[in-house]
Amino acid sequence: MVKSSSVKKFFVIVFVLLLFQPLFGVNLNLKDDYSPEISSYKKPKLVNSAKIVSVDIVIDIYFLSSRCNVSIEYLQTKENATSITDKVFIWGNISQLLVSDSLGRNLLISSSYNLTSGYTEIIYRFPRALSVGEKYSFYIVFLSENKEEQGTLNFDFRIFFTQSVSILSITTFLTNSLSLYSSNPEPQTISTIGEKLKLTWNYADSSNFVLLIKYKSLENVFLVSPLVWEVGYIPRSANKIKQIFTLTNILNVHQQVNITANVTWISTKYKTIDLLPLEQKKVTIEIKLQAGERSGKIIFQSNLSKQVTECTVHAYVVADINPWMIVSIFLFSFLIASLVIIFFIWQNSKEEVAKIEKKKTKKYDLGKLSKFLNEKEEKIMKIIIEKPGQNQASIAAKTGLSQATVSRILNKLEGKEIINRTSVGMSTLIYPNEKASFFKLIEKDNEKE
């Protein structure tokens, strides 16, 4: 009986501890200096009916502040008649907070800042209940103030969720006017976008993320340790180039070797610096960068504290030109040129036809028609001679005569073999019979000569 009572007490204590345990997250193997202190928080009530499937964070770092955009996507896994209410914790002195979906609806219920812990609790609610299998996305946008410590500016970003995240991706942009000193954790990829340095982190199954970036504003110095980089430039006159810089006999501690090159991109996709360790010494290799009017340098520092006898920097550069884009441009140019040529041919042929018709009209003296035809017949013949191939309705419209009158006159002229009628489809077109002796009578005098 005593044992049974003790077991019950044990389970009650365990239940209470689990109920009031602090908010926790997956360990990302960060240094202790960067681990957040959130023991003062109690674990929020979990959202059991929906799961956070992805979080995409974009951070733009400026001199005094940084702009953060956190995009969160939920998946409804269980049936629930009420709309989802959840929360996140963001560390730092944040301002201009906005929680909204793609339709611009405000989802923010409340936000409160804890002065002791430095965390802001953000509570939000969806505008409606979701169906099972339905996804819903929204974003949290805010500004974060950067801090200065010992002459170096720090941007510290920490975010915690109430549940584990399936996919967490963070992209940070740092302008070239600011120089990266270090970042923790180290990014998976580093590249340049325009005049910005782009750092990207991707983690799976995470419920927290801690990012500390130190940078300076006085010098364009990129201290990278222990990452290795690929550097190079895209030449204007060549599609592919290979640059090899060889450094030998680096014996002194902290000796700097300068390599100057015009650099338009940097990457960590391939290993480009091979350090051959021999003795317990430390070597720093400096590569100067020149991109347009902006200049800077990247410093590679051996993190193993070993002497280097030879260091080779390989820069494989391929012009960033898509062959399909060239084909598309060629086809588009060919299409435009073809249309222009067809238009000019059509325009010229139209002008030639007009000239021929004009010549035919000038061949006859239409003033002589009145000698051989009455007024109505003269009107109709002028129209037929000036523009052969018209139908009866068109002639009636131009002369102002009735269809019956025009039909009677056309029958009369056809009987005299002055005109011909030709059937084309459903229409009957009228042409002058220039072989008739009548047309010799109305020729111009100079034509007879």
Image (tube, rainbow, N blue to C red):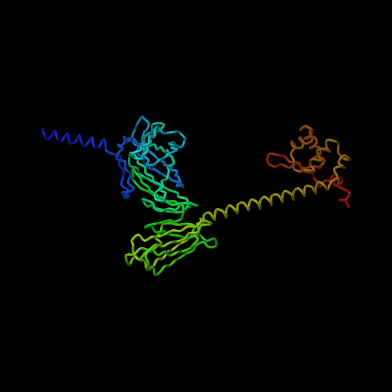
Residue ID at (45%, 43%):
67
Question: Where residue 385 sits in the image (x, y, percent)?
Answer: 80, 43
Question: Where residue 68 sits in the image (x, y, percent)?
Answer: 43, 43
Residue 442 versus residue 113 in the image, above or below? below
Please name whichever residue, 266 or 421, is drawn nearer the observer in this view of the structure. Answer: 266
Residue 45 versus residue 201 in the image, above or below? above
* Quadrant where the N terminus is found in the figure: top left
In the displayed structure image, the side of residue 443 where residue 271 appears, left or right: left
Of all residues, the one furthest to the bottom in this rendering is 249
Residue ID at (52%, 54%):
324
Of all residues, the one furthest to the left in this rendering is 1
In the displayed structure image, the side of residue 112 where residue 449 appears, left or right: right
Residue 101 versus residue 254 in the image, above or below? above
Please name whichever residue, 368 or 23, is drawn nearer the observer in this view of the structure. Answer: 23
Question: In the rendered image, which quarter is residue 134 located in?
Answer: top left
Question: Where residue 327 sits in the image (x, y, percent)?
Answer: 54, 55
- Number of labels in the image equals 0
Please name whichever residue, 6 or 37, is drawn nearer the observer in this view of the structure. Answer: 37
